Image (cartoon, rainbow, N blue to C red):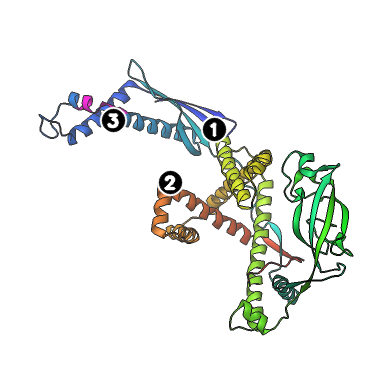
């Protein structure tokens, strides 16, 4: 075979193959003979029909198998010849059979990137403590009391801890926010019957605390500067004027922490049982947070330790999948298609960045797995699929068939391999415990 390989700088290569006429003829003859052995043609005993008849009767199938065999052989030889690390092969044009009997074809090959694996042993990471303190427990209990609080309408001025029911409109530069920015502004388009606690908060600094001292029927103009991390990027750092009318003042009444309260959450259980359950849940959540922190830092260090080109076709494919997931999540959170369309550019940019990070991380971890001889057993894959089936609320056998039909079993195997490898790298890391002020949420309700 005459083979030429042209490597591209974007993890791809063009392979051109010319198969000699004698090789084409020999391969075709072998295929025709194989068809003849099993052919059942009227007028001839099984296996005794002339090869010319067989070749005419099954011309299309024979040509298809011939091209498939020679293309696979040509690509395999090119891969061995150039020692290519191949991710996928795509024959771009219909193979050409010349007048003199040679077969010519061209294939585009996506290659795995070539790079030196960065240092991955003994990486220094920081993680919050997984210890559950009395302060953590008290904070969670207080949060539970807040959830089960009762509210009473009162005729007095708002004070710390009260809730105000308000109607408001919002403007910037003298125009309604949506008009000023030229698109939907969500919360900033105004609300009726909105509940606001009289306290400062990070989402809308100054809104709740600015209502202190007002009573039902009072109006107030609040001019607030939106935080730089405000979810609506068009108003980040902008001054927004809120025209607020208080309709109701509500006093919050918190339940006592006793066995009666515990029984509402855990029938026939007392406060000690409730505290034990909360401690367990807090511990599990703290361990998850600590684990996530380690993984995030390890991934960041691995990625910053090396740079290389990524296959653009894979980047495009991963980006598309990420964008679809982001839009689906936005819809589930109440965003309209119009709002999503307005943020299309931001979604595309974020999806592309995440795609590149995911692919780069996967390539690095796959190389580490090779160096450390980390392997995935069939039992590992079965366990992962069983967990996926349970989450999808589907029978395991039916779920396996779905994965097989979508050719997704290998994706599951690769996902397990990546998970085992990241666990290996994290396990070799040097971990420093740091303090954290956040209290993880529990599921006690």
| Residue at the front extreme of this rendering | 217
Residue placed most toward the observer, 405 or 61? 405
State yes or no: residue 61 in magenta.
yes
Classify residue 365 as left or right of residue 154. Answer: left
| Residue at the top extreme of this rendering | 99
Spatial CA distance of label 3 from label 2 is 25 Å
What secondary structure is marked by label 3? helix
What secondary structure is marked by label 1? strand
Residue 267, quarter of picture: bottom right
Vertical arrangement, residue 332 with respect to residue 154, above or below: above
CA neighbours of label 1 inside 10 A, class few (<14), some (14 to 19), many (20+): many
Residue placed most toward the observer, 382 or 32? 382
Task: Point out the tag, 3 or 2, that comes first from the N-terminus.
Answer: 3
User: Magenta part of the protein: which range?
Assistant: 54-63
Location of the C terminus by quadrant is bottom right
Q: Position of residue 296 (x, y in %)?
A: 67, 55
Task: Point out the tag, 2 or 1, that comes first from the N-terminus.
Answer: 1
Instruction: State the residue position of label 2.
Output: 407
Classify residue 248 as left or right of residue 307. Answer: right
Instruction: State the residue position of label 3.
Output: 61
Residue placed most toward the observer, 106 or 391? 391
Residue at (68% x, 59% y) in the render = 293
Residue placed most toward the observer, 234 or 64? 234
Question: Magenta-highlighted stretch: main secondary structure?
Answer: helix
Residue at (86% x, 42% y) in the render = 174
Q: Position of residue 105 (x, y in %)?
A: 42, 25
Instruction: State the residue position of label 1.
Output: 12
CA neighbours of label 2 inside 10 A, class few (<14), some (14 to 19), many (20+): few
Classify residue 340 as left or right of residue 406. Answer: right
What secondary structure is marked by label 2? loop
């Amino acid at each position: 075979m005459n083979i030429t390989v042209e490597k591209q700088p974007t993890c791809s290569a063009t392979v051109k193959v010319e198969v000699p006429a004698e090789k084409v003829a020999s391969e075709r003859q072998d295929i025709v003979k194989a068809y003849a052995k099993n052919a059942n043609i009227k007028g001839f005993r099984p296996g005794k029909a002339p090869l010319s008849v067989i070749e005419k009767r099954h011309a299309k199938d024979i040509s298809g198998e011939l091209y498939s065999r020679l293309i696979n052989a040509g690509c395999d030889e090119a891969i061995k010849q150039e020692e290519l690390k191949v991710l996928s092969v795509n024959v771009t044009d219909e193979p050409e059979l010349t007048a003199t009997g040679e077969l010519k074809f061209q294939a585009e090959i996506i290659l795995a990137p070539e790079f030196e694996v960065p240092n991955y042993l003994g990486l220094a990471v920081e993680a919050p403590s997984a210890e559950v303190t009395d302060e953590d427990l008290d904070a969670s209990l207080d949060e539970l009391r807040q959830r089960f609080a009762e509210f009473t309408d009162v005729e007095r001025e708002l004070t710390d801890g009260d809730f105000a029911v308000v109607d408001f409109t919002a403007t910037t530069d003298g125009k309604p926010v949506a008009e000023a920015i030229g698109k939907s502004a969500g919360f900033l388009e105004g609300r009726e019957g909105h509940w606001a606690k009289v306290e400062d908060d990070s989402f809308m600094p100054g809104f709740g605390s600015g209502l202190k001292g007002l009573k039902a029927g009072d109006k107030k103009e609040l001019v607030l500067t939106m935080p730089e991390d405000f979810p609506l990027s068009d108003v980040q750092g902008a001054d927004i004027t809120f025209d607020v009318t208080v309709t109701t003042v509500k006093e919050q009444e918190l339940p006592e922490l006793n066995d009666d309260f515990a029984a509402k959450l855990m029938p026939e259980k007392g406060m000690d049982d409730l505290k034990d359950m909360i401690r367990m849940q807090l511990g599990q959540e703290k361990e998850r947070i600590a684990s996530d922190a380690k993984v995030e830092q390890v991934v960041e260090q691995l990625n910053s330790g090396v740079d290389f080109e990524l296959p653009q076709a894979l980047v495009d494919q991963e980006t598309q999948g990420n964008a679809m997931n982001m839009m689906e999540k936005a819809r589930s959170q109440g965003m309209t298609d119009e709002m999503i369309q307005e943020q299309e550019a931001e979604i595309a940019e974020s999806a592309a960045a995440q795609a590149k990070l995911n692919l780069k991380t996967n390539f690095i971890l796959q190389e580490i797995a090779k160096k450390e001889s980390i392997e995935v057993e069939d039992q590992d894959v079965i366990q992962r699929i069983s967990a996926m089936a349970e989450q999808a609320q589907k029978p395991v056998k039916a779920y396996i068939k779905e994965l097989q039909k979508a050719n997704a079993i290998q994706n599951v195997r690769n996902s397990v391999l990546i998970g085992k490898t990241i666990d290996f790298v994290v396990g070799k890391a040097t971990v420093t415990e740091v303090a954290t002020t956040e209290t993880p949420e529990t599921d006690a309700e």
